[in-house]
Image (cartoon, rainbow, N blue to C red):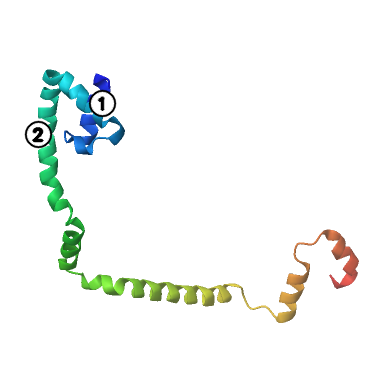
């Protein structure tokens, strides 16, 4: 066990040997006994941090319950219940209006003119020559 590795274990797992990795526990305990003065000072500092973390860990278990209680106690704005249906109705109405408006913008063409335009729009000039006088 190196000094560096021992301090890494203390930082990661705390001062309680029961929390240390099982495969390194014996070596870490032997290092702590062999270097009692150096390891002891660091372990005292880490022990104070462990105590603080243990105090904080108690309420952390009930965080989910506390969060649900707080969220349930918040007032629900009345407008939010109607926002989604209103937005959906507005989008539907806008789509219908645009659909009818697009029909008005196309002009008043007879059915024959529309069929002729659809049939020959985009063809090359040789089609016009093929049609002859009818074009």
Q: Horizontally, is 130 left or right of 98 in the view?
A: right
Q: Quadrant of residue 26?
A: top left
Q: Is residue 58 above or below residue 93?
A: above
Q: Horizontally, is 12 left or right of 94 in the view?
A: left
Q: Is residue 20 above or below residue 109?
A: above
Q: Residue 109: percent from the left, percent from the top?
A: 67, 78
Q: Residue 83: percent from the left, percent from the top?
A: 31, 71
Observer-nearest of 125 and 80: 80
> Is residue 25 visible in this depiction of the protein?
yes
Location of the C terminus by quadrant is bottom right
Q: Horizontally, is 78 left or right of 51 in the view?
A: right
Q: Pointer 1: residues within 10 angstroms few (<14), some, or many (20+)?
A: some
Q: Horizontally, is 132 left or right of 95 in the view?
A: right
Query: Which numbered tag is attached to residue 114?
Result: none
Residue for badge 2: 48
Residue for badge 1: 27
**Sequence-wise, which precedes: disc 2 or disc 1?**
1
Look at discs 2 and 1 and give the one toward the viewer: 1
Q: Quadrant of residue 113?
A: bottom right
Q: Residue 84: percent from the left, percent from the top?
A: 34, 71
């Amino acid at each position: 066990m190196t000094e560096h590795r021992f301090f890494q274990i203390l930082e990661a797992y705390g001062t309680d040997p029961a929390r240390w990795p099982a495969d390194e526990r014996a070596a870490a305990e032997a290092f702590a006994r062999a270097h009692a003065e150096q390891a002891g000072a660091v372990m005292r500092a880490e022990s104070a941090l462990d105590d603080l973390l243990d105090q904080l860990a108690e309420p952390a278990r009930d965080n989910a319950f506390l969060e649900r209680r707080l969220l349930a106690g918040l007032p629900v704005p009345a407008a939010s219940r109607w926002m989604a249906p209103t937005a959906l109705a507005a989008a539907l109405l806008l789509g219908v209006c645009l659909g009818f408006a697009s029909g008005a913008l196309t002009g008043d063409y007879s059915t024959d003119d529309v069929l002729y335009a659809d049939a020959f729009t985009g063809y090359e000039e040789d089609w016009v020559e093929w049609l002859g006088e009818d074009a």
